[in-house]
Image (cartoon, rainbow, N blue to C red):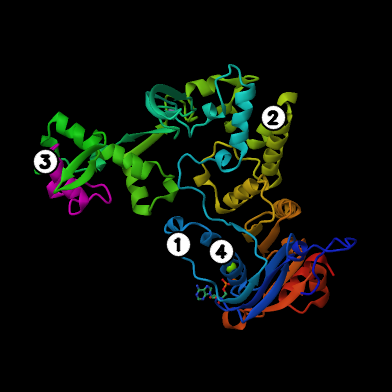
Amino acid sequence: MSRATRTDTQSPAPQVADSHDLIRVHGARVNNLKDLSVELPKRRLTVFTGVSGSGKSSLVFGTIAAESQRLINETYSAFVQGFMPTLARPEVDVLDGLTTAIIVDQERMGGDARSTVGTATDANAMLRILFSRLGKPHIGSPQAFSFNVASISGAGAVTLERAGRTVKERRSFSITGGMCPRCEGRGTVSDFDLSQLYDDSKSLNEGALTIPGYSVDGWYGRIFSGCGFFDPDKPIRKLTKRELHDLLYKEPTKIKVDGINLTYEGLIPKIQKSMLSKDVDSLQPHIRAFVGRAVTLTACPECGGTRLSEAARSSKIDGINIADACAMQITDLAAWVRGLDEPSVAPLLAALRQTLDSFAEIGLGYLSLDRSSGTLSGGEAQRTKMIRHLGSSLTDVTYVFDEPTIGMHPHDIQRMNNLLRQLRDKGNTVLVVEHKPEAIAIADHVVDLGPGAGHDGGRIVFEGTPADLVAARSTLTGEHLAAYVGS
Ligand SMILES: Nc1ncnc2c1ncn2[C@@H]1O[C@H](COP(=O)(O)OP(=O)(O)OP(=O)(O)O)[C@@H](O)[C@H]1O
Ligand SMILES: [Mg+2]
Ligand SMILES: [Zn+2]
């Protein structure tokens, strides 16, 4: 591609800094790529096409995004890098003009049971500020409305240096968070069916426990025999009340077994931490099955499933509290926000409206902000992530999408196209792997890979504008697009 997409025609003395308006790939050989070279215009929307197996992912994800990621990782300290996967440099001779790549994929969101559509975008953060400013009664800062922040207070002696002397002072502090103290912000409480945790006719050493991963041959065996809280050779039904309580509920307690410091904790808090704090859908299947058998989740009786403390729920705007707002369908919430006329928070209201409107634009107006993000489908998750980036003030980022329109109705494809354009117009480079002509048609630049799959692919068979692609009709993609635009 030689047509650099420069727009500043009248500037007399071009700045060197302005010359980096291309991402240049030279000699890429990742997977099936055949020494491929290509130049991509920055701050434009480029769509990558080609039959399945032609090498689109190898170029966009395997080469460009992978190298960007690797270079970013290298900027972290050696200590932090120790926690990151070591990435090999992709097989490519030269890669120039990269910017930070953000991959917006269809991977499920999840992992954390406290993540919702609202917290995964900026919508909840904005609502919290809104309620802390306008809610009556006034209960505190935005974090008083956050179900991820627990209320804590404390007091103690602090030592500080003052005028060359060491002085001790008593200090106290308190943080008002919005987390429901009963369910710790999960919105649900768990009831355990004890018969699913163990066979009470057996002793621990006979393998009474039926919890996946809790075999007595391993660490648990050593902890149970060494802790001294109960007799591991007694059948569980013969344990005293005290012993059974320690087995099931004991608070984390430091113990020493064979000279090693360990922490003992009752089975139920342990299961709560290891299995129930994660989103159910992100668990391995056998663990999910166990949770399904042993644990009944019911809405928390204290907060009614809203995850929020009583104080947070008491503070209202026009009779609506933040939990009500998050439970509304997003389109209804947008209408409610539109009705608020408060000059003191006008910029905040504008930003919130824009975020809520982008949900509707992208066809997700039917969701509510309190929906657990782990329960979103792949396409819904990808679009939710996109909203987060639309709200972001980062620019000059390379966004990489893998078939964002997959499974979408043509009407929604147009909306997705609008969002891709908005991301570009904020000054970002947008790279999209796509098959649908509706999505190809809006590209500034098309790169068609092929001609075939695998060994027969890995080359660029066309690059240029969609109009050129139609005019050339030299490739299968060109034929498809021509049929779509009706020429
Ligand atoms: N990790 C890998 N190791 C070896 N070969 C690979 C690897 N990943 C992909 N390939 C091969 O490289 C070729 C290009 O694959 P690639 O995933 O880039 O295709 P694609 O154009 O993205 O296809 P699709 O539309 O199906 O996603 C294919 O023949 C594929 O089998
Ligand atoms: Mg692919
Ligand atoms: Zn609760």
Q: Quadrant of ligand 1?
A: bottom right
Name the amino acid type tagged 1: Pro
- The location of residue 396, given as percent across then percent down, is 69, 56
| Residue 299, image quadrant | top left
- The location of residue 256, given as percent across then percent down, is 17, 43
Name the amino acid type tagged 2: Val
User: Which is more N-terminal, label 1 or label 2?
Assistant: 1
Name the amino acid type tagged 4: Leu
Residue 337's tag is 2
Q: Residue 418 lies in magenta, yes or no?
A: no
User: Which is more N-terminal, label 1 or label 4?
Assistant: 4
Residue at image point 41% right, 31% down: 183
Q: Residues within 10 Å of mark 2 (few under 14, many from 20)?
A: some
| Residue stretch rendered in magenta on the structure | 201-230
As drawn, 456 above or below 149: below
User: Which is more N-terminal, label 4 or label 2?
Assistant: 4
